[in-house]
């Protein structure tokens, strides 16, 4: 039976007054797995009001850090008990492989535990400002945090926002992407079973233009944390000007992966494949531009294409699938359009390029791992974020050209360098204008390290201790002793 989802407002599961619903699909076979409500502007305002009332009452913000940590750990434990279900829901709704979904679920549990542990730390500093004057600098919650999440990591991106926002004592209103609400609903079911007071956490399903926009514009929302496209991020920043709310943006990328001739070739090929084909390339930090030094270009491409050909594409829950479905038919069409553009621009299609409609994938949204070679920096497939399993492999002559080409982009999210020469690798990675970088690796990340981008890839940082600041005010208290 198709599950009918509900909104979670002020600690209650409620139906929307809007009779229109959104079919939630499994992108591996287009089966309808649930029907989601489309919250109205009024319902969004109601959820914000509930969050504000909960904040002002002090039921959460007024609790000691240890009490808040206890609730975060409860949620983490409940998620761990439901790890398989969370991963299955993510695979079913997003299309990613079960292995990827399990890793996201485990990292989500770690994230709640990490922020619970941080609550043991001192909350500020004091110093002698002048004779008889003691100054305290303290951190305080901001109030209501609006959390807007994309469809590519529905669970992990939700938790990356929920955990630090709650840890710091805020109330929250979360909006998942319209097409991928399943794991967010499950997390809220677990939150509902925890000791989090009513009204502190609210969940709204609905469109970006209604629910998301209302959150971004609301004068009762004090901070908005958004992950998604650069275009929508710009709109959110404009909408936030009404009450000058704090804005945290995690946006798109077109990240360079620089392979020098002295790199360990097997390692470089491995990570350059993982860098783009993980999550079917629907990852903001994907290494979608691979830059390879002239002298090893042909050998690299030969090995790379041979390995990419062997990637097993299939439904995320099928045994042995290494690359899952594209999240929706609409997004699949957009990726196929970019592949067409690449061919028209004169890039060489070395592998893939088509939708897969065989071996049980007839009804799903699957695209072959796609490799373009002999590309140049002016091509749209090199400049624009495709957000799919499409990689462009470019040549460079020397270190100077590698850095110039790597930074020739409006984005600055991620980047990597492959070389056995430690000094060279460090010299180059420091010049890559991006917030998340690797040397001789790709995509490895952990909750302790701040996540976010330079240039149009965003403002602020997620996870790590940096994320606490995104949800906090800073106050000085000067005491005349
Ligand atoms: P978007 O279309 O930007 O959607 C992201 C979220 O914003 C969704 O919940 C969406 O709701 C909502 N939204 C849409 N219009 C809005 C508006 N006017 N006001 C407020 N909210 C609005 O992105 P996407 O297609 O879901 O995700 C793909 C993009 O996100 C890629 O460009 C990718 O690079 C980026 N991304 C970046 C990161 C990081 S960490 N930097 C992580 C993941 C994704 P609906 O679903 O209802 O439209």
Image (tube, helix red, strand yellow):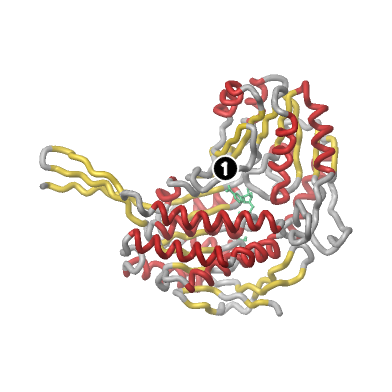
Q: Quadrant of residue 381?
A: top right
- Tell me: is circle 1 under 8 Å from ligand 1: yes
Q: Vertically, is 52 above or below 410? A: below
Would residue 171 be visible to someone looking at this image? yes
List x then y, in percent, for residue 172.
45, 63
Which residue is pictured at 62% across the width and 64% down the height?
86
- In the rendered view, does 358 fall on the left or right side of 78? right
Q: Quadrant of residue 169?
A: bottom left
- In the rendered view, does 91 fall on the left or right side of 361? left
Given residues 37 and 77, the one toward you in this image is: 77
Quarter of the image for the N terminus: give it: bottom right
Q: Quadrant of ligand 1?
A: bottom right
Q: Which residue is mark 1?
A: 457
Which residue is pictured at 10% across the width and 47% down the height?
481
List x then y, in percent, for residue 250.
55, 48
Which residue is pictured at 31% across the width and 49% down the height?
122
Given residues 257 and 53, the one toward you in this image is: 257
Given residues 452 and 67, the one toward you in this image is: 67
Which residue is pictured at 44% across the width and 57% down the height?
165
Q: Element type at marker 1?
A: loop
Disc tally is 1
List x then y, in percent, for residue 423.
58, 21
The single residue placed furthest to the right in the displayed view is 358
List x then y, in percent, for residue 334.
75, 52
At label 1, counting other C-alpha atoms closer than 10 Å, the crowd grade (few under 14, some 14-19, many 20 or more) is: many
Given residues 459 and 452, the one toward you in this image is: 452
Q: Vertically, is 397 above or below 306? A: above
Would residue 216 be visible to someone looking at this image? no
């Amino acid at each position: 039976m198709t599950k009918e989802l509900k909104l979670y407002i002020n600690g209650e599961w409620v139906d929307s007054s809007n009779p229109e619903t959104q079919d939630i699909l499994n992108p591996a076979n287009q089966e309808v797995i649930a029907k989601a409500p489309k919250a109205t502007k009024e319902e969004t305002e109601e959820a914000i009001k509930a969050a504000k009332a909960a904040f002002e009452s002090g039921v959460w913000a007024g609790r000691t850090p240890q009490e808040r940590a206890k609730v975060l750990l409860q949620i983490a434990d409940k998620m761990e008990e439901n790890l398989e279900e969370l991963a299955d829901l993510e695979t079913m709704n997003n299309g990613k492989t079960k292995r990827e979904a399990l890793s996201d679920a485990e990292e989500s549990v770690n994230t709640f535990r990490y922020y619970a542990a941080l609550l043991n730390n001192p909350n500020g500093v004091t110093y002698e400002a002048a004779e008889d004057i003691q100054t305290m600098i303290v951190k305080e919650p901001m109030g209501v945090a609006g959390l807007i999440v994309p469809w590519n990591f529905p669970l992990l991106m939700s938790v990356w926002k929920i955990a630090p926002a709650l840890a710091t004592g805020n109330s929250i209103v979360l909006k998942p992407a319209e097409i991928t609400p399943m794991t967010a609903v499950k997390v809220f079911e677990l939150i509902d079973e925890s000791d989090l007071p009513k009204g502190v956490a609210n969940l709204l399903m609905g469109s970006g233009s209604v629910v998301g926009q209302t959150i971004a514009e609301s004068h009762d929302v004090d901070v908005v944390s958004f992950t998604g496209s650069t275009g929508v991020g710009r709109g959110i920043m404009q909408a936030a000007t009404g009450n000058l709310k704090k804005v945290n943006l995690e946006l798109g990328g077109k990240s360079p992966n620089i392979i020098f001739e002295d790199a360990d070739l097997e390692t470089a090929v491995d990570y350059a494949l993982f860098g783009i084909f993980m999550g079917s390339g629907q990852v903001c930090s994907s290494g979608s531009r691979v830059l390879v030094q002239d002298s090893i270009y042909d050998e690299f491409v030969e090995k790379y294409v041979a390995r990419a050909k062997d990637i097993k594409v299939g439904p995320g829950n099928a045994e042995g699938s290494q690359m899952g479905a594209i999240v929706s038919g609409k997004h699949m069409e957009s990726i196929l359009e970019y592949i067409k553009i690449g061919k028209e621009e004169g890039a060489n299609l070395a592998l893939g390029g088509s939708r897969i409609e065989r071996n049980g994938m007839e009804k799903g949204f699957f695209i072959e791992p796609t490799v373009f070679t002999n590309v140049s920096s002016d091509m749209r497939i090199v400049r624009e974020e495709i957000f799919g399993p499409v990689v462009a492999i470019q040549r460079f002559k020397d270190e100077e050209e590698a850095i110039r080409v790597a930074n020739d982009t409006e984005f600055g999210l991620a980047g990597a360098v492959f070389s056995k020469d430690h000094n060279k690798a460090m010299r180059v990675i420091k010049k890559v204008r991006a917030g998340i970088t690797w040397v001789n690796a790709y995509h490895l990340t952990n909750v302790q390290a701040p996540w976010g981008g330079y240039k149009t890839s965003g403002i602020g940082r997620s996870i790590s201790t940096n994320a606490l600041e995104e949800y906090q005010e800073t106050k000085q208290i000067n005491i005349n002793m």
